[in-house]
Image (tube, helix red, strand yellow):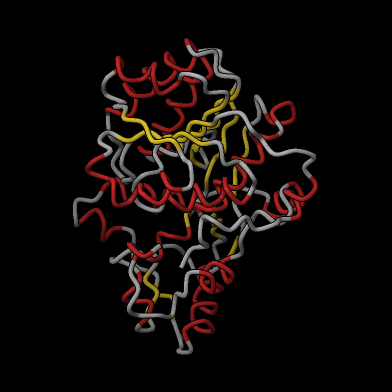
Amino acid sequence: MSEDINTSKKSEVQSSSTTHFHSKVLLIGVTGGTGRNVINGFFQQGVTNLRIITRKIDSNRSVLSKLIDLGVEIIEADLDDETSLPGAFTDIAAVYCHGIATDSAKPNPKEIERAYRLAQAAKQANIKHFVYNSAGGVDRNSGVPHIEQKHKVEQILQESNLPTTMLRACLFMEEFWKKYTRPSILKGSFPFSIPKDKPLHLITTKDMGRVAAYVIQHPQKYIAKEIELAGDVLTPQQIAEIFSQVQGNTVTHKQLPAWIFLLLMQKELYAIIRWYSTKGYQADVMKLRAEFPGLLTTFREFLQETNWANTELTYENL
C-alpha cells in the first residue's frame, strides 16, 4: 500500500536540493502504527543515514528486519530510562521526534517526563537541530488536553535552548482508516461530528517524514520556525464526495451531535470535536504547497495511494 522504502521518489523539492544529508539522524517514535511511512518520507528525500530507537529489538525484529537490511541502525533505548539515552544520541547531528507517547485523545502524563529526558539528552549531545511533530492549534488556547500537552512539550524543548523546528501536524488522513471509522464509510455513511461546511485540514504521516527531512536538510531556514502543517483542506461534505468517487458508491456525511460523547463519558473527544467545530486548524495549505512543492499529498491522492476501496485491507496494512 505505502510506497516501498527502497524507492526514492524524486520530488520537486528533492531535485532542487544541492546535496543529500549525510549526517546521522535519530528518529524517535516511528516503530509503531504508521511510523514506517515517516521513514519512507525520509528515504524519499535522500536522508538515509538513520538511527531508530526501540525498547526491545527482539520483540520488534519482524518489523525492523527490513530496515536493518537497508542499513538503518536500530538501537535499544527507553524514554523512561534516562541512562539508556546517551548512547542513542551519540554521533547524532539532528533529531526528528514523531511521538513520545501512544496517540490518544487522552494525554499520557509520561509524555512530559519523557520530554524532559529527551531535552536533557539532546542538549548533552549538542544536537544541531531538533524537529518535533507537534499539533496544530498549540498556540491558540485550544482547550484540548492532548494539544495542550504538545504545547508543554514544545516549551520544554525550547526552554532547553535546543535549535528546534516545530512541525504542527493537523489531522492525519490515516485516522479515517481506523476500525471505528472506515467500515461505516465503505458502507456509505460518513459519521463525523462537525458541520458539513466546516473546513478540516489534513496531512499524511509520510508527508510529515518528507517535510521533516527537507527541514533538516535546510536548518538555516527552519531553525526556530513553527509550521502548522497540512496537505489538503476540505469540508466533511467534500470529503464524503471524494469517498464516493473513490469507492464507487454514494457516501453521505452525517453530523453526530457532540453531546453524545459526553453521554459516553468521552470528554476528551468532546473537547476535540468542539474545537474542530469552532476554532479548528488554520494551516495555509496553498502557501505550504508553494513552500514544499511535491511533498504534500491531497486527500484524493492519499485514498488512491493506499488503495482505500480494497475492503480486504486494514489500518495495519498502512
The residue sitting at 57% across, 48% down in the picture is 43
- Whole-percent x, y for residue 93 in the image: 57, 23
Which image quadrant is residue 301 in?
A: bottom right
Residue positioned most to the bottom: 249
Residue at image coords 75%, 38%? 19
Residue most extreme to the top? 124
As drawn, is 175 to the left or to the right of 236? left
Which quadrant of the structure image shows residue 312? bottom left
Tally the numbered discs.
0
Residue 40 placement, left or right of 176:
right
Q: Nearer the viewer, residue 260 or 213?
A: 213
Residue 318 drawn above or below residue 167: below
Please, is residue 244 above or below residue 124 in the view? below
Give coordinates of residue 15: x percent, y percent: 77, 50
For the C terminus, the image quarter is bottom left
**Extreme-left residue of the structure:** 264
Q: Residue at x 32, y 27 (%)?
A: 77
Q: Is 20 in front, or is 211?
A: 20
Q: In the image, residue 62 lies at what x, y percent?
A: 29, 52
Identity of the residue drawn at 52% across and 62% down = 3
Residue 68 placed where, x, y %? 41, 44
With 118 as the anchor, is 59 left or right in this view? left
